[in-house]
Amino acid sequence: MQVVKYIMLFFVFVASSLIGKMVAKKYTYRLQELEEMKNALNVFKSKIKFTYEPIPEIFAEIEKNTEENIAKIFRLARNKMQKQSAETAWKEAIEETQNNLNKEDKQALSMLSKMLGQTDIEGQTSQIEITQNFLGVQIKEALEEKQKNEKLYSRLGTTIGLVIVIILI
């Protein structure tokens, strides 16, 4: 009977430690997604400026070369552009896609939709640059949050698991 109790306590400890590590990893994932989105927008800006390809074709190419969570945004926007304007499709894709970006990140990306497909090349590239600059600020904040909170949540999960084990012993 004691063996079963200790095995259960071990699993409680391991589970709480893993939960803490999962919460801590969200900070890393957000930072990676912000950097990936900034790179994707750079490709988007270059393609608009130099190739004059239609936006859905550019999105298809970006989708192939980006990490899955960011590729989902471009895929969904491209699919929605068949029935909607680029502005509406981009906004809805940002809102509907599940990823690690927070509300402020999504708002910054939604701002891009205002000029998407509605202005000339210069207007669109300047809006992309504004969005990239804001994403740069968000990346700095995400890095600070990651450095501050990643260890905290990882250790907090382990500590809570240890406290639960001690209480149950």
Image (cartoon, rainbow, N blue to C red):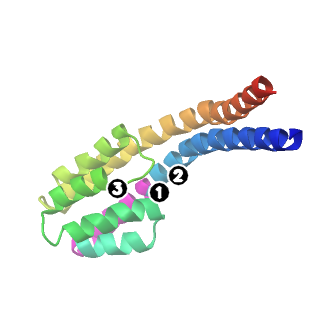
The disc label shown at residue 8, or none: none
Q: Quadrant of residue 1?
A: top right
Q: Nearer the viewer, mark 2 or mark 3?
A: 3
* Proximity of marks 2 and 3: CB atoms separated by less than 8 Å: no
Q: Residue at x 77, y 30 (%)?
A: 165
144 left or right, relative to 167: left
Residue 40 in the magenta stretch? The answer is yes
Of the residues shown, which amino acid type is indicated by label 1? Answer: Glu
Could you tell me residue 13's position as x and y percent?
74, 38
Q: Is residue 70 above or below residue 156?
A: below
Foreground pick, 95 / 136: 95
Of the residues shown, which amino acid type is indicated by label 2? Answer: Gln
Residue designated by label 3: 97
Residue designated by label 2: 32
Residue designated by label 1: 36
Foreground pick, 62 / 100: 100
Res. 51 visible in picture: no
Q: Main secondary structure of the magenta part?
A: helix
Query: Which region of the structure is painted magenta?
Result: 37-55
Foreground pick, 56 / 166: 166
Label 3 secondary element: loop
Residue 12 in the magenta stretch? The answer is no
Q: Residue at x 61, y 30 (%)?
A: 148
Q: Quadrant of the C terminus?
A: top right
Could you tell me residue 50's position as x and y percent?
29, 71
* Proximity of marks 2 and 1: CB atoms separated by less than 8 Å: yes
Could you tell me residue 38's position as x and y percent?
42, 54
* Label 2 environment density (alpha carbons within 10 Å; few <14, some 14–19, many ≥20): some
Label 2 secondary element: helix
46 left or right, relative to 66: left
